[in-house]
Image (cartoon, rainbow, N blue to C red):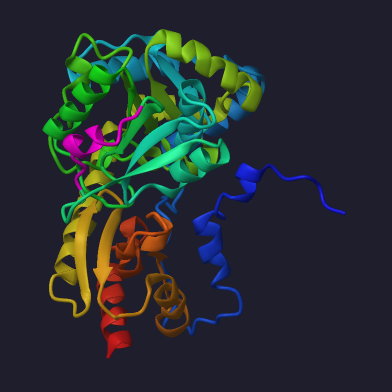
Amino acid sequence: MTLPLNPAMAATFAPPVMEARRWLEGVSFPPGRPLLNVSQAAPVEPPPEGLRRALAEAALNDPAAHLYGPVLGLPDLRTEVASQWSAAYGGTIAPEEVAITQGCNQAFCAILATLAGAGDEVILPTPWYFNHKMWLDMQGMKAVPLPTGEDLIPQAEAALRLITPRTRAIVLVSPNNPGGVEYPAETLRAFFELARTHGIALIVDETYRDFDARSGAPHDLFADPDWRGTLVQLYSFSKAYRLTGHRVGAIVADRAQLAEVEKFQDCVAICPSQLGQIGALWGMRNLSQWVAGERDEILARRAAMNGAFADLPGWRILGCGAYFAYVEQTSGIPSPELAKRLVREAGVLMLPGTMFMPEDDPRAARQMRIAFANVDRDGIANLARRLTSWRS
């Protein structure tokens, strides 16, 4: 006898990173060729000592850190985000227009729960972030793929042709996961105008904003006095401050939408982690220079990726930035099979393009995602050598 299963859940694919980890079972990696894991984009080192001390101090001496907190997050953290974002984007964001969540994935789930229901449609550029697709599938929502060209930049004109009476939102991720590309400001503006004209939401996931190669604001959308009612921004504190295990994310949206988010949060998490929020607030107030150094290192690794793959036989970079390179391979081996063979034969774990694309898109079989934030420049050079040796 088995328990009944929600058909939408049954139809949702397994978590890709967990699936990839299972490829490691039974495989041994010799000391001279340890595993190069470029499958998941997450800091592997702990936060800097000052932030850890702030967490320890709160855990030891702040009784409130162990209790339920406000459903939409600590007022001080919401105020800090509003203040720093208003300055960074040249707009006006109130603390009441910020909600704190248990990570950015939960931010996405929360805002979609307020915007759409079963049978509604959400436009996702491809390649897409697989957790976005998974959540839509679980909820019985239809993910409408928006193909991108060789530059991986979506076009608003193409999205226009996909809008139907059931369309509720367009989702953009910039810098992009998995593509690595940074969407031009004019691209975001075009999508904003499209969404506003059609009365749908534009969700901009800026999880990797701290590692954007451009100086200044990446877009001017918050400077538009009419951003409310159209624009929703998502953010993660995990990458900038190495707080992945503490699960702290954020939503910026108008107050009416966040009142609906509060209902979702109260049922799913009750409140975000108090300690995680304390760490995020301390980081925002004290680690701007440290984060700038982290950005410099990621940009150096980006340059190393581009250099290492410039003349790598059988591989071509389609997009590179933030934590990711999205590449095309010409081995003739379908990417899911190639990914498993690289584990066994080269000691490399990366994800196939089929995890980021619709099942019927033939390009997926030639594409791979490389998460290079967890390997330094020497590791990137080693990756290129292994891929060269494997092909030989």
Is 156 inside the magenta-drawn segment?
A: yes
Tell me which residue sits at (45%, 22%) in the image.
115
The quarter of the rendered structure image containing the C terminus is bottom left
Residue occupying the far right of the picture = 1
- Count the marks: how many? 0
> Compared with residue 73, is residue 128 higher up or lower down, i.e. above or below?
below
Q: Residue at x 87, y 54 (%)?
A: 1
| Residue 244 left/right relative to 334 | right
Residue extent of the magenta highlight:
153-164
Q: Nearer the viewer, residue 23 or 66?
A: 23
Q: Is residue 25 left or right of residue 172?
A: right
Q: Nearer the viewer, residue 50 or 5?
A: 5
Which residue is drawn at the image coordinates 12% and 31% (left, top)?
Answer: 186
Question: Quick check: 224 above or below 284?
Answer: above
Q: Position of residue 170 (x, y in %)?
A: 33, 32
Q: Position of residue 177 (x, y in %)?
A: 33, 48
Image x and y of residue 72, in percent: 52, 17
